[in-house]
Image (spheres, grey):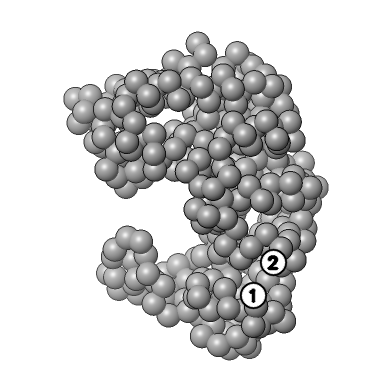
Amino acid sequence: MTHRDYVLAAINHRETDRVPYSFGFDDGTDKELDAYYGATDWRGKLQSFLKTVGGVDANAERQIDAAHRQDIFGTVWRVDRRPWHLEKPALSEPRLDSIVWPAVEQFPLSVDANVAQLTGPQAEQFSILGNGWGLFEQSWRLRGFENALMDCIAEQDFYEALLEKLTALRLGMVARFKDIRADAVMFGDDWGDQRGVIIGPERWRKLLKPRWAKVFAATHAQGKHTICHSCGSVAAIIPDLIEIGLDVLESVQPEAAGMDPFALKKKFGDKITFWGCLGSQSTLQFGTPKQIRARVQALCKRMGKGGGYILAPAKGIQPGTPPANAAAAVEAFATQNL
């Protein structure tokens, strides 16, 4: 079996002799492992089951100065600190006519020059096209976070009109993928915080569910799988995500309310694939290397049963993670089920 075959088996809920995985690093934490090992040979232990082969830049930002960027809609971000700070939303008032709406062709599309060799039945890895920030996130990028939350309640006609415009753009972006051979399209829309769905499950169902259903349907019409990233607690809407055609839910942050991976597997594991589940805020940061190895093995054994699981940290290795813990995770990923 190729690495691609392992991923496809997971998505199709077929159990295999090992669990496919991804392993990422944030803000240069991989360099800390170079120092810890005293070499770079450790990198060869990790296998690549999935590969991003291109996608649409849904923000199309330009640098204004050393501290600021402006996206294609006109929102200004301060980027010389983390987290980035939204300094000036493009839509300071709940009116769509206050900006020039970009055409879908204005969003840069980039595809690996060797995409024909990286995709299709003979490919070694499962290929993914990226589609950037999603509908909810893009709405608050345009309005500011607090304004967008108030719009959901006090300016519903405007907010729905805004979401319609964003959905049309998203569908246009998916349409640009039509002739690109790839296994899946990856979307991202942080619907949850640590406590639950940010706008509440009922508003999510009214405002976002029918629009994401259209995007997922358009993706499936191209023969591609749907993947969506969301941080936080989205347990309340997982049945809805299954209903509208989400194939893979990525991140599955175990510290968030209701997001215990094993409970989710028991309830939904035959209907959706979970990608992630290893706690970046808990196990990787504060566990011992022994506990990390045990957790990885438990995830592989219990989440991988019957397929439907791709192993990964919920977020790439974060700054502040003890190098010994990151090394333990690398070793556990590299040797699981072999």
Q: Is residue 11 visible?
A: no
- Name which quarter of the figure residue 114 lies in: top right
Q: Position of residue 34 (x, y in %)?
A: 24, 30
Furthest residue in direction top, as rendered = 338
Q: Position of residue 249 (x, y in %)?
A: 62, 43
- Name which quarter of the figure residue 197 lies in: bottom right
State the residue position of label 1. Answer: 152
* 98 lies left or right of 312: right
Q: How would you rate the neighbour count of disc 1 (Cα within 10 Å): few for under 14, some for 14-19, many for 20 or more?
A: some
Asked if residue 174 is positioned above or below residue 169 in the image, the reply reads: above
Q: Is residue 80 visible?
A: yes
Q: How would you rate the neighbour count of disc 2 (Cα within 10 Å): few for under 14, some for 14-19, many for 20 or more?
A: some
- The one nearer the camera, 200 or 5, is 200
Residue type, numbered disc 2? Arg
Could you tell me which quadrant the N terminus lies in? top right
Asked if residue 8 is positioned above or below residue 220 in the image, the reply reads: above
Q: Position of residue 46 (x, y in %)?
A: 42, 24
| Circle 1: element type | helix
- The one nearer the camera, 101 or 248, is 248
Q: CA distance from mark 2 to mark 1?
A: 8 Å
User: Looking at the image, which residue is at 65% across and 40% down?
Assistant: 248
* 216 lies left or right of 106: right
- C-beta proximity under 8 Å, tags 2 and 1: yes
| Circle 2: element type | helix
Q: Position of residue 237 (x, y in %)?
A: 68, 51
User: Looking at the image, which residue is at 64% across and 75% down?
Assistant: 152
User: Looking at the image, which residue is at 69% across and 66% down?
Assistant: 203
User: Looking at the image, which residue is at 34% across and 71% down?
Assistant: 78
- The one nearer the camera, 85 or 220, is 85
Residue type, numbered disc 1? Cys
* 289 lies left or right of 72: left
State the residue position of label 2. Answer: 203
